[in-house]
Amino acid sequence: MQYQQFSESEQQQSTLNLGLFYLFYNSGSGSVKANQFSVLDCADITLIIDSKEVQISFFSIQNVPSRNQGYNKLKQDLRSNNKQIPIIIAGGDGSMMWVIEQMIQQKIDINQIVIVPLPCGTGNDFSNALGWDTDIPGNMLENDYRILKQYIRSWQKGHQCFFDIWDITIQTQQDGYFQEIKKNDKGYTKQSIKDLDGMNTNILEKKMSNYFSIGVDARIGYGFDKNRTTNRHVNKICYCLQGIQKMFLKNPRLNQVVEFVEHFNHKEQKTLFKTVNCQDKNALTVPGNPATLVCLNINSYAAGITDIWKNGKTPQEFLQKNKLYSEKTSFSDGLLEFISFDSIAGIGSERVLAGNATRLAQTSGPLLIKFQESNNNNTVNSYIQIDGQYFCIVNPLSVEIQSCRQLPQGKIRILLKD
């Protein structure tokens, strides 16, 4: 694994406070194992680790008073502390980004905290990419916090490094809108995303840490959201069943939805690749008729599939015209990897029989994904996912991807397992 390590001056400025930890938990995440920490909500406990005192504070990110109390306490500790404070996030991939977005809103100095994932979701790809595995034991608090103490020792031995965060801005055409699956009194139902005035919004802004995709994998996840359970393993079975079901449905292919992907800045615009319907004769054409386009920031996808980029095949034409920086990937190099899969079966079998992905581009931002425009007789429906959050877009227009503007150099500090 490659990652951007700190320079000597940065190491001197980034000493980690090994005696103070914050743990923010999402009791509703996939496996609901994070719910075990609710008995310590808004509490501080002091443990003896290798003859030294370690304090850890617990707060719920779902409970507004609890999380606000946690953020206010964290601000006070940051003002009186000249060391980085480790923030443990017990939840899934979405929980991690949720906490970071809230801390930005709370004007917490992101450069003074170090994010550590504790995998309690369904996929847990962020945690897997940092070496912290994809699951935790059922009870970390029993037997005088024995397992929690083991984790604290691992956190104390971890290595700080940078991690890229990306801004995703999705826009629909004037008559377009977004839908997502939300839980209410009737269970999980399809709901349109509204703006502050209660109208269907045409713009969706999210932050991305792991990956972004367009196509059948997002459609499978969208269907899975309707059948989520509180058991991680049952959730995986539900996801597989959705995949089998979608194999027998007519799914929109990339050639029917996307027109091109380009890199742009103030100096130039360059089309990285296009589908068969784009008129740019000089641009590289995506081979075949893929079912899914995936943009990767980490080396873990779909609940733990690794080395997709490394094992993927590169069309000869792309080798000659598109610069591939490395067969290895990094979450801190400012680059994203674009791949495609031809079928649902290709995605599913990648876990056991690698090499089903096609490598399309390895590039920095900012990037523009242009969708094919609908007409009066043709409504375009597309499915997307951002870090395991799934959406249906009616009449999409474009996606912009760029380094997060609210973070120093578009990066956060994370803890990599020793």
Image (tube, rainbow, N blue to C red):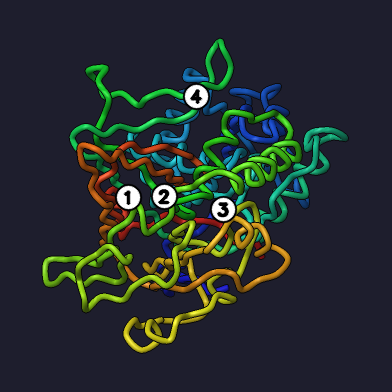
Q: Amino acid at mark 1?
A: Asp
Alpha-carbon distance for marks 3 and 2? 11 Å
| Place of residue 104 in the rendered image (x, y in percent of width and height, measured from the top left) | 35, 39
The mark nearer the N terminus, 3 or 4, is: 3
Answer few, some or many: residues within 10 Å of disc 1's Cα (few below 14, many 20 plus, some between 14 and 19).
some
Q: Which residue is found at the position 59% from the left and 70% from the top?
A: 356
Marks 4 and 1: which is nearer the front?
4
SS for tag 3? helix
Q: Amino acid at mark 2?
A: Met
Alpha-carbon distance for marks 3 and 1? 17 Å
Instruction: Report the residue that reaches farthest toward the top.
Output: 185
The mark nearer the N terminus, 4 or 2, is: 4
Q: Which residue is mark 3?
A: 126
Task: Kindly indicate whether the residue at mark 2 contacts the one at mark 3 (C-beta within 8 angstroms).
Answer: no
Instruction: Report the residue that reaches farthest toward the left.
Output: 267
Residue nearest the observer in this picture, 92 or 308: 308
Answer few, some or many: residues within 10 Å of disc 4's Cα (few below 14, many 20 plus, some between 14 and 19).
few
Marks 3 and 4: which is nearer the front?
4
Q: Which residue is mark 1?
A: 167
Q: Amino acid at mark 3?
A: Phe
| Place of residue 265 in the rendered image (x, y in percent of width and height, measured from the top left) | 17, 66
* Count of numbered tags: 4
Answer few, some or many: residues within 10 Å of disc 3's Cα (few below 14, many 20 plus, some between 14 and 19).
many
SS for tag 4? strand
Q: Which residue is mark 2?
A: 208
